[in-house]
Image: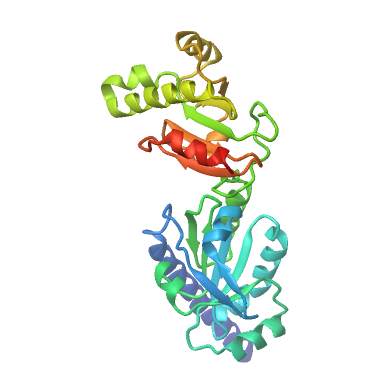
Amino acid sequence: MTLIHFITALATALFACATCGAADDGATRAAQAGQTLIGQPAPAVVLRTLDGGTIDLATRYRRKPVYPKFWATWCAPCLQQMPGFERIHRQYGNRIDVIGVNAGFNDTEADVRAYRTRHGLTMPIALDDGSLGRRLNLRVTPQHVVIGADGRIAYVGHLDDAALHAALDRVAAAPRVFRVGDKVAGLDLPSGAAGKPRALVFFSPWCETYLRETRPATAQACRRVREDATRLMKQGGVDWLAVAAPLWTSDAELAAYAKAHPGTPPLALDRDGAAFAAFGIRAIPSVVLLDADGRVARVLGPEERGLDTVLRAVRGR
């Protein structure tokens, strides 16, 4: 090996080591930034776009997963990742809201506009004034934040690697969570009457008995909701369905519950838990009220009362 070849190889190796070290450091900083974020609700922030519009993140969370990626025009690893970022936008664009968030640090709008044109970026470009960065513990650029359709932060990272793509695949494949105002479709439940409001009571047949000792307040709430539903169903005008979680529940046990409590709404077993997941129900009893157009009008949790009043408002729409 000639001296010039040796020097060239040495320089290449040193550059690779420096780059590797920077990447490792960036990954560590992003991981530390994400420690307190994972599983937490994502912040409700309105971002200004490069084209003069706005992006209301809170409304985006309700529709599908959101992937805001922080970057800067002066950031070397951002430049390296930009072709991959554009590919991600094209690959996941129908299933995930991909947003390029300029960190707003040491950049001008002219810089960002020229950068977008030069690199052919087609995803929405937002300009952070520091508000989103502060709430998402921005510590490096690029910083990836993946938010599920449930509005909770699922991943924070620095590299365009297998972990990022696994996180994107997970949130893209996760069932949608319906929220107030969303039109409900695709649930594997008995159909309701067309043109009528619908009340879905999420419960477990063992709630009133098994939880009487360990969670007496929950057992009382389950009894209260059952009695309210039984009474209100007799008034007509609303399609009722009681949906049982599959935990410790079989068809036979559900049939025994119906026999023990005659007059209750029709019962359905959510065999794979998909209906509970579709509305983000993690506690019983809960009631989801749909209006006559099949849109979520209200979700009542275990401690909420006033089902009569809420139901009247839904029926009056």
Q: Residue 124 vs residue 306: left or right?
A: right
Front-most of 153 and 186? Answer: 186
- Look at the image and tell me whether residue 225 can be seen: yes
x 41%, y 61%: residue: 34
Q: Residue 51 vs residue 135: left or right?
A: right
Q: In this view, does 88 lie above or below 198?
A: below
Q: Is residue 15 above or below residue 69?
A: below
Q: Where is residue 130 in the image (x, y as percent from the top left)?
A: 44, 78
Q: Is residue 244 above or below residue 71?
A: above
Position of the N terminus, as image quadrant, is: bottom right
- Total marks in image: 0
Q: Position of residue 223 (x, y in %)?
A: 38, 22
Q: Position of residue 193 (x, y in %)?
A: 68, 29
Q: In this view, does 283 lie above or below 216?
A: below
x 59%, y 85%: residue: 6
- Look at the image and tell me whether residue 64 can be seen: no
Asked which colour scheme the image uses, the reply is rainbow
x 53%, y 73%: residue: 47
Please tell me in which quadrant of the rendered image residue 316 appears.
Answer: top right
Front-most of 127 and 160? Answer: 127
Front-most of 36 and 130? Answer: 130
Please tell me in which quadrant of the rendered image residue 175 appears.
Answer: top right
x 61%, y 44%: residue: 295
Position of the C terminus, as image quadrant, is: top right
Q: Position of residue 10 (x, y in %)?
A: 55, 83
Please tell me in which quadrant of the rendered image residue 126 appears.
Answer: bottom right
